[in-house]
Amino acid sequence: MRKLKHLVYAVLLFIMVSTPMSVSADIGPKPSVEIEFIGLEEEEYYVTLLSEIDSTGPWSEGNSYYEYMGDEAVFKKFSEYEDADGYYFLSYMEDCSEDDVFEWNYYPPQKFKVLIYLPEKDSFIATGQIYERYAFDSYFTVYVSDVEASKIEAEESYDFSMEIVSLIARVILTVVAELLIALLFCYRDKKSLTAIALANVVTQVILNILLNVINYNSGQYAFVFHYVWMEIVVFIIEAFIYDKAIGRENKATGKKYHPWAYAAVANLISIIVGIWIARVIPGIF
């Protein structure tokens, strides 16, 4: 048991060292809006979101121009734009000519219109309707079939299919990792491995669905916070199942089982694997 305790301490130390956290006065990520533009690949263009209210976070209507804001002439054009519904330009804009993606990652407006300015034509294209952030990180796609048009529409484009693929992959990798660790703890008979596999499938599916919902609605920091206490609950549930369903001794071989130690080590290792995968393949996990 002493060796197992040392292993648990080593794993905890590894997590603390390998996952540093930055601290700042403005803690936590903020909601974001990301818009992909289709049909403007050959154009020079700038984008902003017109807001229902005249300020959000550090962004306000009528702010003075500063060099970091981008092209001064374009900034002035946006400032002079008059929206039919009285929506405001909040002094934030981006040149989207290179990657055709607009990102507002720090206090974007809750309700907005998309406004595009084309300097070479000295013309604007705006969405006819009003849009609203629908998730913590809201994704939209805007299709522009005619640069001479004055109105366009945006579509919500959150990638739910990737979330499903990610969920399935996480569950499979967790089950495989914990079964491999089970072999090291002498869980090698069919009954034990079946119980461990079933327990992990159930707990990991529920855990990952809940975490996906939290991440969708509240963002990454809420995800991490809930992930910690939920993993502790999962550890307790799985250890209890192993203790009751498998027991503490293999009657066929006489070998002792350590269900609580196994559950602790297995869950810590699976967390490390998850963190590593998230860094190596951030687009999937």
Image (tube, rainbow, N blue to C red):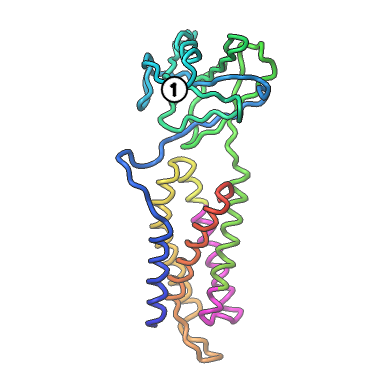
Image location of residue 96, percent across then percent down: 57, 25
Q: Dot 1 surroundings within 10 Å: few (below 14), some, or many (20 or more)?
A: some
Q: Magenta stretch: residue 221 in it? A: no
Q: Magenta stretch: residue 188 in it? A: yes
Prevailing secondary structure of the magenta residues: helix
Query: Seen in the image, is 107 located left or right of residue 155?
Result: left
To which quarter of the image does residue 116 belong? top right
| Residue type beneath disc 1 | Met
- Give the residues in magenta: 181-208
**On the image, numbered disc 1 is attached to which residue?**
69
Image location of residue 261, percent across then percent down: 42, 75
Image location of residue 115, percent across then percent down: 54, 17
Q: Residue at x 43, y 41 (%)?
A: 218
Q: Residue at x 60, y 40 (%)?
A: 159
Q: Residue at x 54, y 80 (%)?
A: 187
Q: Residue at x 52, y 58 (%)?
A: 276
Please name whichever residue, 117 or 173, is drawn nearer the observer in this view of the structure. Answer: 117
| Quadrant that contains the N terminus | bottom left
